Image (cartoon, helix red, strand yellow):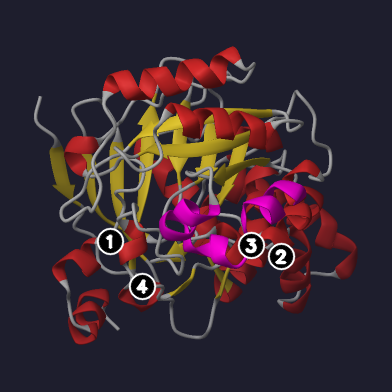
Amino acid sequence: MAPITQDVHTIPRKLPEGGLTNIVGLTRDQLRDALIAAGTPEKQAKMRLGQVWQWVYHWGVRDFTAMTNLAKDYRALLAANFTIELPQVVSRQISADGTRKYLVRIAGGHEVEVVYIPETDRGTLCISSQVGCTLTCSFCHTGTQKLVRNLTAAEIVGQVMLARDDLGEWPVQGAPKEEVRLISNVVLMGMGEPLYNFENVRDAMKIVMDGEGIALGRRRITLSTSGVVPEIARTAREIGCLLAVSFHATTDAVRDVLVPINKRWNIATLLEALREYPGLSNSERITFEYVMLDGVNDTKEDAYRLVELLRGIPAKVNLIPFNEWPGAPYKRSSGNRIHAFADIIHNAGYASPIRTPRGEDIMAACGQLKSATERARKSKAQIAAEAGL
């Protein structure tokens, strides 16, 4: 089955005139304050906040007139002051294995990619936190695209919401409650380094985790970092999600090349922060992501060094066969080499699953994401014209 590419021909979205406030991405406190500022009596603010929140994040409603438990005059007040806006889906590609990749346009005409990976026991949505990336990891296609800007909380939450739109996952009023969720897990493993956009990522994930809305539990969300040490403890305190680390090497000399942030916070410094990760326990292991690069980091000696480095940290190691991209300077390790590496890790008492590459035919696999804008090298003028700006 060949991959399917669909262009989504929608009119590029612009905020309506008059400076309406986008509800999407506002925290509960921010939305409450905005409702009061728009004329909601303070005594009613808590109730109105709960009602609007459920309509937007539980039911997925975008039209204020459909919020039927609100009086008509209050719905008119909302429409006069607020909007409910998501990023624009430019195209959707469906892989032969069912993986979906969305090219998403955000304010300013910039583009990011979002990937949905269906599996038998779960559905994982991989979302982006920045346009491009500042880290320049040498094995990562995204890292070859320069950082443009951080995504807002609205643009991060909006990725989850637009995927739910496409999958038809919003509940239907009056229908029997359906416990099976197509998006059961969210991973911040798309474009960008989440911990270099901490506040927006935190606010977005608090919205996604809120029990009266999208309601994904904190253990259903995994944040992946390349090792921004000062923000690691803060992640546990202020977000509380699971943590993954893009590790990829067992010596500073190799990691300096693969993950240049290592020059600032080396392996020893990173591991010390991880050992002190608040609430660390066997039930909430840290995931170490390790891309397998032929002749670079895949020897038995590397595997034994990795075991020693992880000693004392509840951990699992995700081994990722390198997903090649045009012009990549590396090759994927052989299957025999990967399995031998995995056996050493497993025999030392650590889970060492080998990730099955997904969506390779549509460049949606781990490390392959890069906006079509950058691939095509469009001018800023072209981007602005297409976005209607």
Read off the magenta span. 252-272
Q: What element carries label 4?
A: loop
Q: Mark 4 points at which residue?
A: 146
The amino acid beneath tag 1 is: Ser
Residue 8 in the image: state x and y as whole percent: 21, 53
The amino acid beneath tag 3 is: Trp
Give the Cα separation between the discs numbered 4 and 2.
33 Å
Q: Is mark 3 on a helix, strand or loop?
A: loop
Q: Which of marks 4 and 1 is nearer the N terminus?
A: 4
Marks 3 & 2, CB-CB < 8 Å contact: no
Prevailing secondary structure class for the magenta stretch in the rendered image: helix
State the residue lying farthest toward the front. 301
Mark 1 or mark 3, whichever is nearer to me? 3
Neighbor class of circle 2 (other Cα within 10 Å; few <14, some 14-19, many 20+) is many
Give the Cα separation between the discs numbered 3 and 2.
37 Å
Q: Residue at x 28, y 69 (%)?
A: 12
The amino acid beneath tag 4 is: Lys
The amino acid beneath tag 2 is: Leu
Give the Cα separation between the discs numbered 1 and 3.
28 Å
Neighbor class of circle 4 (other Cα within 10 Å; few <14, some 14-19, many 20+) is some
Q: Name the residue under label 1.
A: 371
Q: Mark 3 points at which residue?
A: 265
Q: Earlier in the sequence, mark 3 or mark 2?
A: 2
Mark 4 or mark 3, whichever is nearer to me? 3
Neighbor class of circle 3 (other Cα within 10 Å; few <14, some 14-19, many 20+) is some
Q: Is mark 2 on a helix, strand or loop?
A: helix
Q: Earlier in the sequence, mark 4 or mark 3?
A: 4
Numbered circle sitting on residue 31? 2
